[in-house]
Amino acid sequence: MKMRSRHMELQDFTEQEQEMIKKGLTFSKLSDKETADKIIALIPQEYIKRIPFFVRKHAITRTIKRISLEYPELYAVAEQEGQLPEKEAQELRQILTNIFQEKMNKHKIKYALRFNKI
């Protein structure tokens, strides 16, 4: 018995995927590292510099993990290829700033805002 290859039909996809196909969008997702790099780029550099170097990687990694768990919809947007849309980038930037301010207050690390010096 010879098997025929079956091409996927539009109805084989979820409704969301069907909409994306109709719009001509791709399904490409970035690796976790690429997604993390995209999110890390939104963290204000003055905050990163204030984190002691020996815990910096841990702090950033845990923050990315926290974003993926607490804000899965924003993390999913960051996983897509290309630049983050401005609205989501702004939301993530604010969330990251809040997380880092919270951590710095908890660990009594002073931080400078862009226009205010310590």
Image (tube, rainbow, N blue to C red):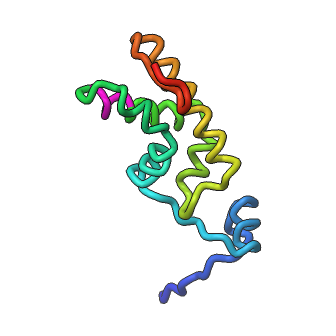
Q: Is residue 78 above or below residue 83?
A: above
The spot of residue 43 in percent (x, y) is: 48, 39
How many callouts does the rendering have? 0
Q: Is residue 99 visible?
A: no
Q: Find residue 69 and report its image quarter.
A: top right
Say left or right for 75 vs 19: left
The spot of residue 48 in percent (x, y) is: 39, 33
Say left or right for 17 vs 34: right
Residue situated furthest left in the rendering: 54
Q: Find residue 19 and report its image quarter.
A: bottom right
The spot of residue 34 in percent (x, y) is: 42, 54
Say left or right for 94 vs 117: right
Q: Please say whether residue 99 is one of the residues in the magenta stretch.
A: no
Say left or right for 27 vs 108: right
Frontmost residue, 7 versus 40:
40
Frontmost residue, 72 versus 103:
103
**Quadrant where the C terminus is found in the figure:** top left
Write the residue at 31% across / 34% down.
57
Q: Find residue 45 and report its image quarter.
A: top left
The spot of residue 88 in percent (x, y) is: 66, 47
Q: Which residues are magenta?
A: 55-59
Q: Is residue 104 visible?
A: yes
Write the residue at 43% across / 46% down.
36
Write the residue at 40% across / 16% down.
109
Q: Is residue 56 above or below residue 83?
A: above
Q: Main secondary structure of the magenta part?
A: helix
Write the residue at 48% across / 87% down.
1
Q: Is residue 97 above or below residue 75?
A: above
